[in-house]
């Protein structure tokens, strides 16, 4: 019971004594290293080697050993330790025979009575060597009982041969090679699951049973309100996809909108929609890398899940480019997907699958802290951040249902492997988004300029771009999810 000071005498321990633990996992150092140029990394390794040689009083042999040890200690050993940990945390016995059918007796015998590594499951499923007895999505809901989330030999090969190269590259040519062919695969391919609106990102739902189309139209209007689109606004959409937001902004808000994409197939679709919606005179399409677009000023800039492809290496440069194109009183809406900071092994195994088959080169899918740090470094002020993960889960589940309904047409044109690959991607991602392994952040930003119209005198205010009071205070200052 509490004494006269109100302090409990019965508590066994204070609240500051607990079992909760946080961890860095070295991410700040990893992010910093990935931002550096290759030459800079060579210089760092050389300086470390010189310092070790001087301290130990060694010769060129000491220098060579130290030079090789630096990248070994910083890269290979942490990766090796991560692989080791993954293979010791999730083993166990299980009877999966009611859920899976192996068409290779050797593999069935190999894993009889024990959990199967997830990487082997999706590879075998895509190759037709393994089938699910029931619906893939429903079976994957039991994945913790059936499968292991450990790194395999194939994961290690992909990471060292391709994934690290993607992270360290991100030139215009490399990004075009990684990205353009993905979205030029065929508009029918994407239409079979995205359906009418052709929006390849999360909708916003009012009800779990609401239609995909209603949720996507609400999302388009929400983004439009976030950046406060007005008639006459000059609007840029980076990574415009099939142009749905560009056409929506021009038709419903009277903007002059420009969409940027690497995929010609997407622009062909967008142009047809513009003609049908009567927006042709108010929209423009640029098929090019974001780094090559003309240096123009825009009132509003939107970027919905393109920035992941920019890469950690170029993220700050990308943001500074956006800032240079944004009017001083403009608004920037950045939507970006990312893994959670307190990751689980499933998150990383899923991430490698996505990098290998779905979104190659999208290594800037990072925790929110990385993104906020980067935008503030670039001189932006954060006004709103929302986590839209559960809405994304519902969206992807709708895509999964559409994909299953169109199985016959998909297999006839693209083959069984493509159908199976996207089936697994959509099913697994529905669950990943539902549990927060990867989510999507909706971030509203403005330039963090020195003064505000309301923070200086009347005469000086004339030269200040905008008033936060007038922008954010009012009956309908900005849309909200709920």
Image: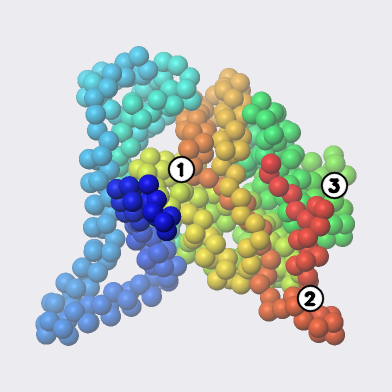
Name the N-terminal-most of marks 2 and 1.
Answer: 1
- 459 lies above or below 126: below
**Distance in Å between CA atoms under marks 1 and 3:** 35 Å
Foreground pick, 333 / 390: 390
Q: Is residue 18 left or right of residue 267?
A: left
Picture coordinates of residue 474, whole percent (x, y) = 81, 57
Name the residue that disc number 3 marks.
252
Front of the two marks 2 and 1:
2
Quadrant, the C terminus: top right
Foreground pick, 176 / 13: 13
Q: Quadrant of residue 456?
A: bottom right
Name the residue that disc number 1 marks.
437
**Distance in Å between CA atoms under marks 2 and 3:** 30 Å
Residue at position x 27%, y 43% in the image: 86
Picture coordinates of residue 444, whole percent (x, y) = 66, 58
**Distance in Å between CA atoms under marks 2 and 1:** 42 Å
Front of the two marks 1 and 3:
1
- 202 lies above or below 286: above
Residue at position x 62%, y 26% in the image: 402
Q: Is residue 356 left or right of residue 309?
A: left
Residue at position x 63%, y 68% in the image: 380
Name the N-terminal-most of marks 2 and 3.
Answer: 3
Any part of residue 6 in sight: yes
Picture coordinates of residue 104, whole percent (x, y) = 29, 20
Name the residue that disc number 2 marks.
453
SS state under label 1: loop
Do labels 1 and 3 touch, CB within 8 Å? no
């Amino acid at each position: 019971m509490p004494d006269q000071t109100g302090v409990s005498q019965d508590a066994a321990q204070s609240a500051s004594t607990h079992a909760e633990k946080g961890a860095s996992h070295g991410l700040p150092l990893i992010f910093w290293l990935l931002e550096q140029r290759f030459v800079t990394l060579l210089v760092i390794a050389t300086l470390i080697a010189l310092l070790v040689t001087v301290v130990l009083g060694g010769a060129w042999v000491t220098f060579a050993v130290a030079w090789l040890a630096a990248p070994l200690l910083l890269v290979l050993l942490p990766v090796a330790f991560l692989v080791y940990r993954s293979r010791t945390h999730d083993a166990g016995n299980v009877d999966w025979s009611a859920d899976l059918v192996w068409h290779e007796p050797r593999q069935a015998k190999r894993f009889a009575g024990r959990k199967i590594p997830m990487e082997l499951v999706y590879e075998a499923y895509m190759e037709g060597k393994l089938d699910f007895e029931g619906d893939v999505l429903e079976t994957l809901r039991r994945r913790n009982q059936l499968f292991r989330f450990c790194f395999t030999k194939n994961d290690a090969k992909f990471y060292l041969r391709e994934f690290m190269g993607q992270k360290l590259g991100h030139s215009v040519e490399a990004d075009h090679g990684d990205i353009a062919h993905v979205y030029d695969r065929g508009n029918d391919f994407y239409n079979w699951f995205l359906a009418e609106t052709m929006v390849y990102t999360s909708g916003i739902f009012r009800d779990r049973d609401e239609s995909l189309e209603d949720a996507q139209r609400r999302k388009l209007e929400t983004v439009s309100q976030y950046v406060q689109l007005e008639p006459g606004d000059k609007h840029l959409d980076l990574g415009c996809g099939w142009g749905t937001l560009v056409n929506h902004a021009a038709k419903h808000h009277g903007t002059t909108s420009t969409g940027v994409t690497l995929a010609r197939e997407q622009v062909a679709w967008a142009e047809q929609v513009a003609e049908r919606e009567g927006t042709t005179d108010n929209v423009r399409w640029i098929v090019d890398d974001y780094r090559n677009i003309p240096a123009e000023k825009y009132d509003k800039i939107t970027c919905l899940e393109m920035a992941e492809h920019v890469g950690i290496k170029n993220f700050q440069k990308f943001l500074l480019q956006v800032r240079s194109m944004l009017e001083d009183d403009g608004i920037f809406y950045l939507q970006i997907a990312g893994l959670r900071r307190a990751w689980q092994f499933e998150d990383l195994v899923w991430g490698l699958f996505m990098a290998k088959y779905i979104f190659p080169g999208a290594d800037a899918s990072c925790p929110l802290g990385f993104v906020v740090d980067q935008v503030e470094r670039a001189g932006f002020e954060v006004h709103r951040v929302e986590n839209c993960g559960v809405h994304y889960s519902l969206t992807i589940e709708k895509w999964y249902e559409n994909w299953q309904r169109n199985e016959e047409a998909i297999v006839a044109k693209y083959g069984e492997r493509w159908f199976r690959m996207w089936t697994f991607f959509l099913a697994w991602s529905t669950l990943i988004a539902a549990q927060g392994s990867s989510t999507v952040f909706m971030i509203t930003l403005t330039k963090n300029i020195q003064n505000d119209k309301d923070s200086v005198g009347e005469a000086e205010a004339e030269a200040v771009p905008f008033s936060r009071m007038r922008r954010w205070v009012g009956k309908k200052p900005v849309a909200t999810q709920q």
